[in-house]
Image: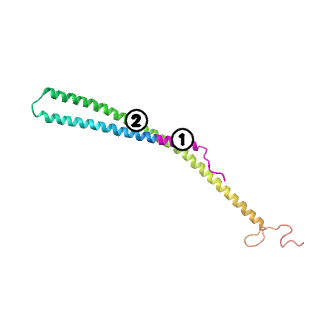
Amino acid sequence: MRRFKFRLQKLLEVRRLREDALRQELARAQEAVRREKAVLEKLRAARGATLEGLRANVDGALDVQWIAAYHRYLGFLACRIEEQRAAVDRAVREETLKREALIAARRARKVVEKLRERAYARYREEVSRSEQAFLDEVGTMRYARKGGEDLSGDTVFHMPGRGAGDRS
């Protein structure tokens, strides 16, 4: 019997490769989100530490230049925090797009795999029918070779020139 050959095997392989590539892209996008969030947390921590430093130093004599410097630095941190929030949002959107692309690729692969499963089931059915036909043929030939006797030893059919009914 011939080997099973799926006519869309190349397409299935391409879809698997595409899914693997998208899975890697999603992992990179997730890592980018983690990095951007870590930067945002560091900026927030720096702002918190700066505010604590300002509060701790306000107890003494007030130095206007010193307070103005803190204020400028806090303004700078606020701008950086907003920029970083935007960077996190962009990274999250990119991650979402990659996840959706991966889901679509997974569906496309599963469609072709379902087709392969059905084709393989048809192939197994065909092989089974072929094997059964072969076994039936072998059984028929053995039966004919033994002169048509059934299991009890009685003759089922008589051929001319043979058997008890022929009195030549």
Which residue corresponds to mark 2?
94
Q: Is residue 6 left or right of residue 80?
A: right
- Residue 91: image quadrant is top left
Tell me if residue 99 can be seen: no
- SS assignment for the magenta stretch, majority: helix
Residue 140 location in percent, x, y? 74, 62
Which residue corresponds to mark 1?
14
Q: CA distance from mark 1 to mark 2?
A: 24 Å
- Examine the rendered structure and indicate whether residue 84 appears above or below residue 133: above
Magenta stretch: residue 78 in it? no
Return the disc, 1 or 2, that comes first in the chain's sequence: 1
Dot 1 lies on which element? helix
Query: Magenta region: which residues?
Result: 1-21
Q: Residue at x 37, y 40 (%)?
A: 31
Q: Amino acid at mark 1?
A: Val
Residue 155 location in percent, x, y? 78, 70
Q: Is residue 26 left or right of residue 115?
A: left
